[in-house]
């Protein structure tokens, strides 16, 4: 959860400056935005799965207005978050060790745990903690940011 919180803090701190910077091509801005938003994608992936289930069970044929946005985010996330599965499958194919592919489904458990943990930390950080009266979590990130010893 610490990595998620730190990465999301970097997203909140730098996204505005990145988008306002002149002289940076749109391609580089979008690349930076996607990189900064890496840990913010897990809640969107869960939201996309939830919307998919709702549309499936309500037998909806017509997409909602935000459907294409969520679909795009889920597709982007699939290429990033599911990359480990693609890499494992490709490596097993190239090595000629097809029997190892039988354990690939077990890595899904790690993915689900990571997805839920990252989503939990992101929701706490951006939705719940701003309304708490207690002080937000603080830690010294690296040596250069540490305060003087008391």
Image: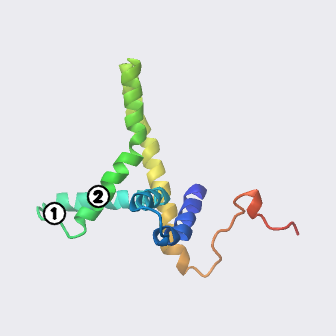
* Location of residue 51 in the rendering, given as x and y in whole percent from the top left corner: 26, 62
Q: Secondary structure at mark 1?
A: loop
Q: Determine which residue is flagged by label 1.
A: 58
* Left or right: 22 as drawn, with respect to 133: left
Query: Of all residues shown, which one is farthest toward the top?
Result: 96
Q: Is residue 1 left or right of residue 74?
A: right
Give x and y (percent) for residue 33. Answer: 45, 61
How many numbered circles does the render carry? 2
Q: Nearer the viewer, residue 79 or 127?
A: 79
Q: Nearer the viewer, residue 29 or 99?
A: 29
Position of the N terminus, as image quadrant, is bottom right
Q: Residues within 10 Å of mark 1 (few under 14, many from 20)?
A: few
Report the side of 65 relative to 127 (left or right): left
At a point 47% along the width and 49% down the height, the residue shown is 113
Query: Which one is earlier in the sequence, the residue at label 1 or at label 2?
Result: 1
Task: Determine whether the residue tagged by mark 2 lies in a helix, strand or loop.
Answer: helix
Residue at horizontal 18 percent and vertical 57 percent from the top: 56
In this view, the residue in front, 66 or 47, is 66
The part of the image, by quadrant, that contains residue 140 is bottom right
Q: Quadrant of residue 105?
A: top left
Residue at label 2? 72
Q: Marks 1 and 2: CB-CB under 8 Å?
A: no
Q: Does residue 88 sit above or below 81 in this rendering?
A: above
Residue 66, above or below 27 = below
User: Is 99 rendered above or below residue 9?
Assistant: above
């Amino acid at each position: 959860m610490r990595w998620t919180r730190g990465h999301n803090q970097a997203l909140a701190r730098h996204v505005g400056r990145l988008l306002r910077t002149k002289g940076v091509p749109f391609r580089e801005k979008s690349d930076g935005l996607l990189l900064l938003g890496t840990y913010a994608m897990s809640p969107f992936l869960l939201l996309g799965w939830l919307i998919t289930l709702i549309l499936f069970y309500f037998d909806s044929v017509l997409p909602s207005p935000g459907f294409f946005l969520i679909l795009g985010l889920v597709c982007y996330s699939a290429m990033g978050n599911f990359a480990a599965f693609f890499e494992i499958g490709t490596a097993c194919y190239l090595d000629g060790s097809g029997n190892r592919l039988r354990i690939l489904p077990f890595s899904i458990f790690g993915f689900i745990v990571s997805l839920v943990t990252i989503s939990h930390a992101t929701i706490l950080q951006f939705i719940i903690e701003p309304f708490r009266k207690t002080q937000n979590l603080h830690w010294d990130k690296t040596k250069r940011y540490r305060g003087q010893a008391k």
